[in-house]
Amino acid sequence: MASDQAQQNSGRVDLQLIASMIQPGSRVLDVGCGDGELLRLLNATRDVDCRGIELSQKGVNAGVAQGLSVVQGDADTDLVNYPTKGFDYVILSQTLQATFEPQKVVREMVRIGKRAIISFPNFGQWRVRMHILFSGQMPVTQTLPYLWYETPNIHLCSIDDFVDMAKSMGITIERFIALDKEGKVSLTNQCRPLANLLAAQALFMVRAD
Amino acid sequence: MNSVTENQYPEERQASLRLEPVMRFGVDAPLLLDCGVSLAPLEIAYQTYGALNAARSNAILVCHALTGDQYVASHHPITGRPGWWNTIVGPGRPVDTDRYFVICANVIGGCIGSTGPTSINPATGQPYGLSFPVITIGDMVNAQARLVEALGIEQLFCVIGGSMGGMQVLQWAYDYPEKVFCAVPIATAAWHSAQNIAFHEVGRQAIMADPDWCGGDYLAHDKRPEKGLAVARMAAHITYLSEAALHEKFGRNLQDREKIGFGFEADFQVESYLRYQGSAFVDRFDANSYLYLTRAMDYFDLAAEYGDVLAEAFRGTPTRFCVVSFTSDWLFPTSESRDIVQALNASAANVSFVEIETPKGHDAFLLDEPELFATLNGFLNAAAQKRGLKNGV
């Protein structure tokens, strides 16, 4: 799927997967773009018009200095400023669980974008379940590396939780991809109930209707 | 279209200044101003740096601030000081004159060679003074657009400027979106705030309270309201700095004395500094120009036409924007840049926004700020690539 060279540039395999889902020539908004890794990947490989929003001003300045179109902003509060269907894709990668109002963020994403691509760690994975069951403590795993008191992840959910929310919001799930802890496509991809138990991460492509 | 006429500046100024080149538009091509008056003849003094490429696609227009001028990267003919944006404009600088053709024009209403209140009013044969029509940021930009057209440039690669220059950048992007490939408004706002209008009013009142102002007619009386203009500059200069910058630079340090003098001489270094700023300013600036240009800034409000919805002003804009603000700038605070960014986002415009951490206040945009250089390098290089500009002309 991705060349070794690109993998060296990118620490995150899931970003390559997301990039591969974007049609060339599209308009893309990456919400929580960090240091602009996905934007750089998209610029280099997909010939797209892409922008980023990043919470940390330091990340923004670094991105702009690299020629990326990035503004400082907060997924929870600033998406309302963007016009309806102003983008082909709105991406939220590994950030949904850190927002204050995930449902509102998802609703804004499918309003702004014709499609939204959302990835998050799966709290329903067996490792998480076992961790709580046997240690009686909040799980610390490779995809959820923080202790409870320092984690930015305040709205964790499982794959089934996300599917339920999407249903309740009338949002159509176009694609679902289960990922392992490295961000590679999981073998459980074809079976969502199994993925909810086995996959470390999930990637959804959704749209409003 | 532009007919060449005699240089009509007061002899004194003409003799002391080498202001060429000047683009002249005759009475056959008046500029219709926002106030309804047609201005003719019109002269625009400007400087250029670098070379225009064959495709005429590498031009960058630099818009100067309130008391700036066209000498963005070359020595000022009056003060002899180096260009006011030498750090940004020049060979190998972010606005690289080896790569881009850089234009900077004195705004109309100004006093460094472009038509303004010191120019001769053709109706009277005397300097305009207060009979000069009130001009707006939009008028300045329309005049620049004529210059750019006369230079044979259809589309500017970039329009860039800080403060009042940033207002012109926004106005350019608004009035001529197809002629501005990318825009860099720095330390500016889409409308002038009540506080800023208030500071300008203090400055204007200081000038008009000077008896040597002579109701605006001081040139005819061979006088200049130097005291009033100096006070205006002193008050304004405070707004360009920050409390932290003043404290760090001067603290409560005394000037050339061991203890306070129990009088009203400049006991403190900060007083001495401000007095110097004031007196140096009157040598290079005209008091009526100061009235006109501050007024133009006060009137600036891009959103006014759209029921205060700024986003409407930029709907569908093709221009790429890079908005820059500075943390300690309280004259044009980051919140006002954010308003611009929010409006551009709402227009789905391509926008970058950088807030730079610095204690230097509003003046930071003129000073050595490596993060500003990095931002401009990144943005301009990426935009140049999109525009198909190669390295080198």
Image (cartoon, coloured by chain):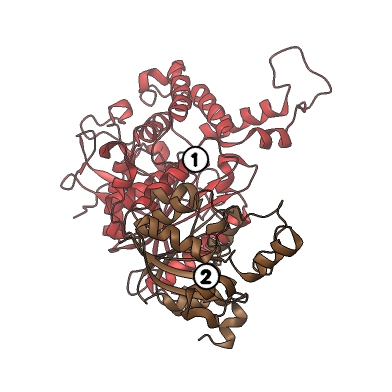
Chain colours: A brown, B red
Q: State the residue position of label 1.
A: B335
- Determine the image quadrant of residue A180: bottom right
**Could you tell me which quadrant the C terminus of chain B lies in?**
bottom left
Q: Position of residue B311 (x, y in %)?
A: 33, 46
Foreground of the two, B380 or A46: A46
Where on the picture, by quarter, is residue B119?
top left
Q: At numbered mark 2, what does the secondary structure look like: helix, strand or loop?
A: strand
Residue A174, numbered circle:
none
Q: Position of residue B214 (x, y in %)?
A: 39, 18
How many residues crowd mark 1 within 10 Å: few (<14), some (14–19), many (20+)? Answer: few
What residue would you read off at disc 2? A202
> Image height check: is A62 above or below B206?
below
**What residue is rendered at 65% in x and 42% in y?**
B359
Residues under numbered marks 2 and 1 in contact, where contact means CB atoms less than 8 Å apart: no
> Would residue B224 be seen by someone viewing this image from the given angle?
no
Give the letter of the chain under mark 2: A
Q: Is residue A146 left or right of residue B57?
A: right
Is the N terminus of chain B in the top left, top right, bottom left or bottom right quadrant? bottom left
**Do pointers 2 and 1 mark residues of a single chain?**
no
Where is residue B243 drawn, in percent x and y? 65, 32
Residue at the image point whose x is 53% and y is 75% from the top: A194
Q: What is the three-letter code of the residue carrying label 2?
A: Ala
Q: Amino acid at mark 1?
A: Ser
Q: Residue at x 53, y 34 (%)?
A: B281
Q: Looking at the image, which is closer to me, A124 or B368?
A: A124
